[in-house]
Image (spheres, rainbow, N blue to C red):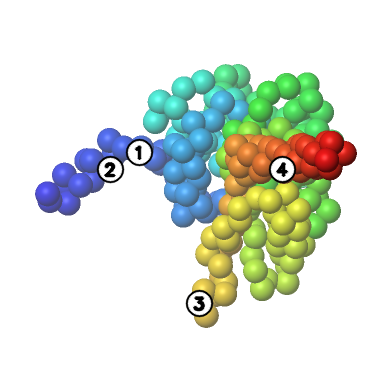
């Protein structure tokens, strides 16, 4: 198989929209990873905290269309002035049926939106304010609505970068407390090169495992009670 054939085959599996990079936005490699996660998740509802100029929001919508991933709503959150400017200056975001730009202060805007929408979240990107408090609050809200087995992409998880200590601390603490799998991407501990980007992937544990473990302990308790009762009956009848 020659390289032309390989490229064709790759294009048949996954199609990427054209990407232009802008400082402050999620980078190319990260978007490639996000694309793969969208293929896995086949999402119906995506949350993005931090819209900025909408580059990632647009990437999500275009990727979903190009790869025929079906009906999906993308809710992206930012401050009123940011959203107003974006809708006034960029016609792509006006009346786009896939995209909902939600204006307001996070985390309250996110909490209100999810409560009102009352639908499970299949994929989330956390990329608004990069402080410990902001990240942990957003993660805690998303956790309540995220489907088991689904992913949260935490942007700017940069180990050993003092500017992003809060993000790393919040993501680690959240993952540990809620039993999420965590995969740091482009970990700065892997090499000595300058770290220009960093992110972490969080995966919500599957209910099946939680359920079977819980069931196991319940079963264990009932079994212990039963054996104790039978033993008592046997002892009193002796
Ligand atoms: C890094 S940018 C988001 C980049 C975007 N995800 C992308 O990839 O293009 C962060 C955005 O978060 C917004 N933001 C920061 N704090 C916020 C808050 N408390 N409520 C709502 N938006 C906030 C900022 O206005 C800014 O546009």
Give the residue at mark 4.
220
Label 4 residue near ligand 1, CB within 8 Å: no
Q: CA distance from mark 4 to mark 1?
A: 47 Å
The span from disc 2 to disc 1 (Cα, nearest Å) is 6 Å
SS state under label 2: helix
Of the image marks 4 and 2, the number of the one nearer the N terminus: 2
Q: Which mark is residue 14?
A: 1
Sequence-wise, the earlier of marks 3 and 1 is 1
Q: Nearer the viewer, residue 120 or 98?
A: 120
Q: Quick one: label 2, few (<14), some, or many (20+) residues within 10 Å? A: few
Instruction: Give the quadrant of residue 103.
Output: top right
Q: Position of residue 183 (x, y in %)?
A: 57, 58
Q: Does any portion of residue 53 appear in the rendered image?
A: no
- Helix, strand or loop at mark 3: loop
Q: Which residue is mark 2?
A: 10
| Residue that mark 3 sits on | 191
Distance, label 3 to label 4, CA atoms, is: 47 Å
Foreground disc of the pair 4, 2: 4
Q: CA distance from mark 3 to mark 1?
A: 30 Å
* Residue at point 46%, 54% (across, down): 29
Element type where label 1 sits in the image: loop
- Please report the residue visible at 64 percent of the width from the left and 58 percent of the height from the top: 156
Q: Earlier in the sequence, mark 4 or mark 1?
A: 1
């Amino acid at each position: 198989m020659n390289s032309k054939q390989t490229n064709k085959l790759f294009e048949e599996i996954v199609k990427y929209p054209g990407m232009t990079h802008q400082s402050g936005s999620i980078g190319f490699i990260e978007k490639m990873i996000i694309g793969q996660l969208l293929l896995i998740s086949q999402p119906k509802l995506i949350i993005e905290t931090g819209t900025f100029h909408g580059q990632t929001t647009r990437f999500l919508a275009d990727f979903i269309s190009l790869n025929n991933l079906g009906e999906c709503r993308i809710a992206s959150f930012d401050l009123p002035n940011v959203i107003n400017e974006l809708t006034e200056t960029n016609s792509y975001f006006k009346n786009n049926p896939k995209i909902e730009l939600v204006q307001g202060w996070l985390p309250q805007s996110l909490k209100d939106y999810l409560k009102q929408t009352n639908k499970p979240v299949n994929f989330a990107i956390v990329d608004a304010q990069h402080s410990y408090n902001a990240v942990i609050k957003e993660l805690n809200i998303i956790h309540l609505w995220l489907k088991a087995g689904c992913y949260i992409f935490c942007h700017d998880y940069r180990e050993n970068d003092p500017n992003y200590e809060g993000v790393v601390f919040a993501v680690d603490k959240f993952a540990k407390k809620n039993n999420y799998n965590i995969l740091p991407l482009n970990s700065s501990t892997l090499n000595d090169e300058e770290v220009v980007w960093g992110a972490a992937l969080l995966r919500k544990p599957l209910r099946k495992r939680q359920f079977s473990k819980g069931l196991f302990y319940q079963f264990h308790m009932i079994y212990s009670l039963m054996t104790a009762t039978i033993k008592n009956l046997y002892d009193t009848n002796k």
